[in-house]
Each structure stands twice: as structure tokens, then as C-alpha cells.
Amino acid sequence: MSADSKRTRGGTRHPVRIASVASAALVAGLLSGAGSRADEQPPAAAVLDYACRLPAPAAGTASPAQTSAEPVHAVVKVATQLPETAVTGQPIQVGPVQLEAVLPRAAVTDLLPAGTTSVDTGATLGVHVRQNEQTAEATWSQLAGRSDLPAEGADLSLRVTGEVPTVTVSSPGDLELVGGDLTLNIAPAAGGTPVTVTCAPAEGDEPLLARAHVPGGEPSDAPSAGDSPGAGEGQGERDGIDVAPDAADTPTGADTCPPEMPTGELDLSQMPPPLPGTVLRDPITLPGQPVCAYAVGFGTVRKLDGSMVINDPSKTPALMNVRANAQTITYKSGPYYAALNSLAEVTLPDAESTFLGFGFAPVTAKVTFETGKLTISTGSIGNPPNREPFAVATFFQSLRIHDVKVNGTPLDVGPDCHTSKPYRATLRADFSEGGGYKDVLHGGVLSGVVDIPAFTGCVGKSGENLDALFTASISGPGNLVTMNQAEVCSPKGKDAPGCPPVIPPLPPIGKPSAP
């Protein structure tokens, strides 16, 4: 992944330059994130053995201060995305990280209140960062997720995901990430006292999480500059390895919701139809409830086979303003049908993407995009025992590409390089295996595919028309988007539940759809 600027100049390389920029623009423009995954290895899970100590039950309840004497065996699976090669002095994006801890089901459920069906888990994993003879310590503390408790079976799987700090090195040589102590905080999703589980790598185990090659000459003992983007004061220079601040040090977001609720028409075209024989009542308009929430996620682009962070939670994500429950639709006769419809709006900031196009050319591109009003519909269809829930969010979006640089050299694409028309994004919930989206107030995960239209108005400084190149590199169907919406902040509710708005963890990365 050489950054040789000579390979990005000259007439014979011009089409490659444009294609590289187009690839960057696709990811940045479509998904409003930063930190491309396009040149990275597919996430591969490291399967590790851990020994965990659980609280001992006391009088029928969990007591975090009382720990069981005998550790239990746990299998911990950690999946990261790491570049195959990295560059000295440049931040190396690790993750997002997906962690699954498999524990004996009975050992955990015995510590939870009777009737608990799902749990929220927060995880903190210590990571040893090493290269040559140099080491540093990182803390992956922003890992979280929700898991259903199985009614039977021997094991319980607790899945969490989240962003983690970057790593910067000043010397060539293989960079390795090695797992350390793990802490799990497990709480009933319905509320209750959390159970704390502490784990350590099994004796004699080498919990290697990931490895990246940093090419160059002979290894140097010179420390890193410590000025990588996102590095905060007090981080220091750690023997040539610099770990950026943990995501916990990033801004927590807004204090409350905007003063006015969104206005406009609801788009009901993507709602699931009622079953044959169902007669619906006329929709009833409601005053709506002023709420707001953060939604973050990933988009996986089929042509690039790479993923991007959407509304990056490690930076300053945009807040979604919502008129919750603005309309209800119910059935009059026949099979059951009920829906609550909400209207939302979000103004996303310009996105910037940086990655190594074609494995050697560092490319950056900014994107301004317009997102129309979002309609979020939740409800259920059918009579018991065949009643099925649904959740769908739909909106239109268009994008404009600008401020493009290849290897630091500006590349003019004109002031109006944009999609030829707005494209529809429709995200739906998957309720299988305990997934889904409860309602607009409680949030959850939604996903869907996006079809990017052709580009127009992309004109270089010399007057060359770049529309076809951008269209060939970017446009097309099958681009999966997955979003996780947090519980809303309700500033006018009792005790302002959910306020200030919480930035949720990232959902698992999805796979692109077939063409």
C-alpha cells in the first residue's frame, strides 16, 4: 500500500486517479462516515479461551461484591477489521470490533431476576499493543449490545460491538493486538441491578486478536510523533506506539432535543400491506410527541466490498429530531392490523473519507448530501399466534462530491458533481433471532439496500466530463445500510426520560447484496 506520489501523476495514470476518487466518493457520499474499510481484510474472528469469575448468588439475588470461588470457562470470539498493511506515522483504524462471549447459561441466568428474557451487556477489553520490542496498552470500553436469553441449552451468547481507539506506530514491523482482561456488565433489559463478570485469558493461551504488517526499512526506536488525528493531550509517546483516546473521551452529544418538531407529510408507501380481508379505518392524526435520538451504523458498498461508518459516533454525530407517534392506523374488521407512524428529520454534516485507493493512492473526498424527511412506521399484522411485528423507515437522499484530493493533490470535479436524482433508502427490521426494532421511542436496528443513481455535473478543470467514470465506479444496486437507533430523549416527559440523548453502539457490519 505504497503512497508513492509518482504513481498518481501523468497522463497514463489519470483514469486510475479518477476511479480512485470515485470509489472514495461512493463510500463517503452515500454513508456520511469516515475511515474507509475498503482496503481491509474481511473481519475474521479470533476464538479465545477465557476463565471468568461470576458473582455468587446471595439470598436469591446477584451480589456483585460477592464472587464465586471457582472460575467458569468461557469462549470469547473477537472480530476486528485491520488493514493488511499500514503506514508509519498514520493512524491505523482498528475495528469496529464485534465481541461474543459464550458462557454457561445456567451460571448467568441464576444471577438474574426470574422472568428475564433479554439482557443489555457492556464490555471492556484490555488490549496489549506490541511491535518489535515495543508495547502499549489500549482499552476497548465502548462495546455494548443486547442479547436474548435462551429458554434452554447449555450456553449463553452475549454479543457486543463498538468503535475502538486507533493505533499509530513510528517504525516498520508487524503490529500485533493481544487480548487482555475482559469485564462484562450484564443487566436485565427491563431494568435491574447489573451483574459484573471478570475474565482473564486462560493460562497458557496466546489471545492474538489481529496482526497488520507495517512495511519499511530497519525498525527504529524513535517514538511516534503523537500528533495523529484524534490524539488528545496527556496520551504521551509510548515507546513508538501511540494509542488514540478511547471513544469514551469523545463528545457525548446534545443536551436535549430541538425546540420544534418536524412538519410535513408522512410517506406510507413502504409500509407492509394488511392481510387479505382486512378492512382499515381511516388514519387518525395525533399531536405527536417531541423526541430526538442518535442513530449510527454501517454501509457496505457492493462494488468496493468495503464498509463505512454512518454518522460516526466517535466524532460529532447528527441528532435526529422526531415527531413521534404522529399518526395511527388500525383495522376495522378482518385480520389484525395496527401501525404507529412518526416523522423525523436529520441534517447530516459534510462527510470526509480517507483511504488508499487501489492500494497505493491516499484519497480524500468530502460530500454534501441532502436527506429528506424520514417516515418511521412500526406495528404488527395478523391474529395470534401468527401475529408478526414490522418496522420500516424510508426517506430520499441525494449527494454532491467536492474537495477531492489524491495523494494530497487537489483534483477538480466541479462545483456540482452530484447524483442525477434523489434515491430512496428503505430500512426494515429483522425480528429473527431476537433482533428487530421495538418502536420509535426505544429504537433498535434497521437495515436495507440502496440503489445509487448515475452522476451528473462532474466536470474537471480542463472541461473533461467525468460523469461516466463516477457512474461506473459508484452507481448501482445492492449497497447494504444498517443503522442502530438509541432510545429517544423525551424532554417534555416525566423526569425527561432518555435525556440527554445517548449515542448508541455500532451494529454489526452487514454484507453487500448480490447484484
Image (spheres, helix red, strand yellow):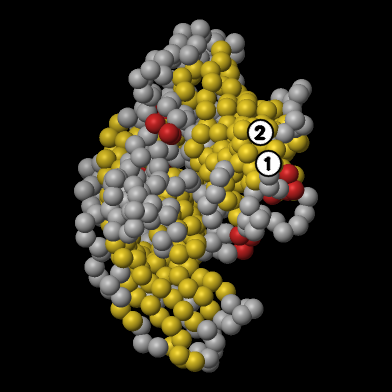
Q: Residue at image x 48%, y 57%? A: 444
User: Compared with residue 326, is residue 202 higher up or lower down, i.e. above or below?
Assistant: above
- Residue 484 position in % (x across, y down): 46, 53
Answer yes or no: is residue 226 visible: no
Q: Measured along the vertical axis of the image, is residue 502 above or below residue 50? A: below
Q: Which residue is drawn at 36% across and 27% down?
A: 229
The three-letter amino acid code for the residue at tag 1 is Ala
Instruction: Residue at 40% x, 38% y: name it.
Output: 314
Which quarter of the rendered picture does the C terminus lie within? bottom right
Precedes in sequence: disc 2 or disc 1: 1
Residue identifier under label 1 = 58
Quickly name the residue at label 2. Answer: 66
State the image quarter where residue 128 is shown.
top right
Q: Quadrant of residue 98?
A: top right
Residue plotted at (77% across, 54% down): 153
Q: Alpha-carbon neighbours of circle 1 within 10 Å: few (<14), some, or many (≥20)?
A: few
Residue 63 visible from this viewpoint: yes
- Name the side, left or right, on which 390 lies relative to 66: left
In whole angstroms, how far apart are the C-alphas of marks 2 and 1?
8 Å
Element class at badge 1: strand
